[in-house]
């Protein structure tokens, strides 16, 4: 149950990010998806790098 909730919240956050990028920057849906995925990838990579430094 908790995994489904975490997944649902994560999808809601990503959808909101997509909507804000698409609206605020007047981007196409695909360009907004690309930026959201880039942000997600960079966040994960930086977190892994920072965790490795501890």
Image (cartoon, helix red, strand yellow):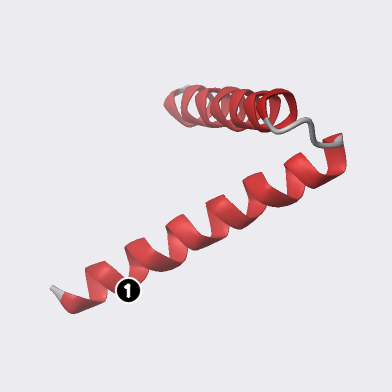
Left or right of 37 on screen, residue 49: left
Q: Residue at x 78, y 30 (%)?
A: 26
* Count of numbered badges drawn on the protein: 1
Q: Quadrant of the C terminus?
A: bottom left
Q: Position of residue 5 (x, y in %)?
A: 49, 22
Q: Secondary structure at mark 1?
A: helix
* Towards the viewer: 27 or 6: 27
Left or right of 47 on screen, residue 17: right
Q: Position of residue 27 (x, y in %)?
A: 80, 36
Which of the 4 quarters of the picture holds residue 12?
top right
Left or right of 39 on screen, residue 47: left
As drawn, 36 above or below 52: above
Which of the 4 quarters of the picture holds residue 52?
bottom left
* Towards the viewer: 51 or 8: 51
Which of the 4 quarters of the picture holds residue 17?
top right
Report the residue marked by disc 1.
Answer: 49
Q: Residue at x 75, y 43 (%)?
A: 33
Q: Residue at x 80, y 46 (%)?
A: 31
Q: Residue placed farthest to the left in the image? A: 54
Left or right of 43 on screen, residue 16: right
Q: Position of residue 11 (x, y in %)?
A: 61, 29
């Amino acid at each position: 149950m908790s995994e489904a909730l975490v997944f649902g919240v994560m999808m809601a956050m990503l959808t909101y990010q997509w909507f804000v990028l698409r609206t605020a920057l007047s981007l196409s849906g695909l360009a907004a998806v690309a930026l959201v995925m880039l942000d997600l990838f960079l966040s994960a990579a930086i977190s892994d790098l920072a965790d490795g430094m501890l």
